[in-house]
Amino acid sequence: MKVAVTGTPGTGKTTATELVETDLEVVHLNDVIREEGLDEGTDEERNSLYADFDAIRGWLAEREDEDGNENGVLIDSHLAHHFDVDKVVVLRCHPEQLAERLVERGETAPKAEENAESEALDVILSEAVAEHGTESVYEIDTTDRTPEDVSTDIEAVIRGERAPSAGTVDYLDYL
């Protein structure tokens, strides 16, 4: 099984996936992109890398065994929903709290605001639903929740104990 944990930067993906108890291989995709050089250069204005999706797909394909069977993987990244997975967990966070988290970790105010607006507009959720359908997308609100609680919810998705829930979180009031 392949599971993507995605969401706007600052929603708690990496923190939560580090706590998930699973037999799946946990892949922090942003680290892999940097460490393996799976990029096509740098966006100087945003101080971020342009991901090379074909190279990432190739790297993920290496996670298959010699018979072509997929080994289980839990992919953590704001890009994870762009890849072939069985389930997509979209972490959400109220845009005000999201902007605060991003500024606290060193992002500029304009970048934090851009991400907060993206969160309010459901950008990543919309992309995930467009690529995988509502039957494969699970929303988890991380606002005012502990990483342990969020990881427990992710574990429930992996075990099949949680129903798909795309469209259950709404932050349009932020705009």
Image: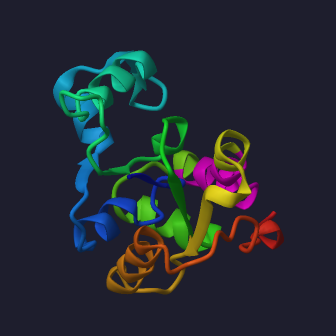
- Rendered location of residue 78, percent (x, y): 47, 46
Look at 29% across and 29% down and name the residue there. 68
Look at 66% across and 39% down and name the residue there. 131
Tell me if I can see residue 6 in this picture.
Answer: yes
Name the residue nearer the viewer: 54 or 86.
86
- Image mark count: 0
- For the stretch drawn in magenta, the main secondary structure is helix
Look at 36% across and 51% down and name the residue there. 76
What's drawn in magenta, residue-wise? 112-126
Q: Is residue 131 above or below residue 161?
A: above
Q: Is residue 161 above or below residue 171?
A: below
Q: Name, please, the residue furthest toward the top.
A: 40
Look at 44% across and 78% down and name the residue there. 156
The answer to whether residue 165 is left or right of residue 43 is right
- Rendered location of residue 43, percent (x, y): 45, 22
The answer to whether residue 155 is left or right of residue 93 is left
Q: Quadrant of residue 159?
A: bottom left
Q: Quadrant of residue 40?
A: top left
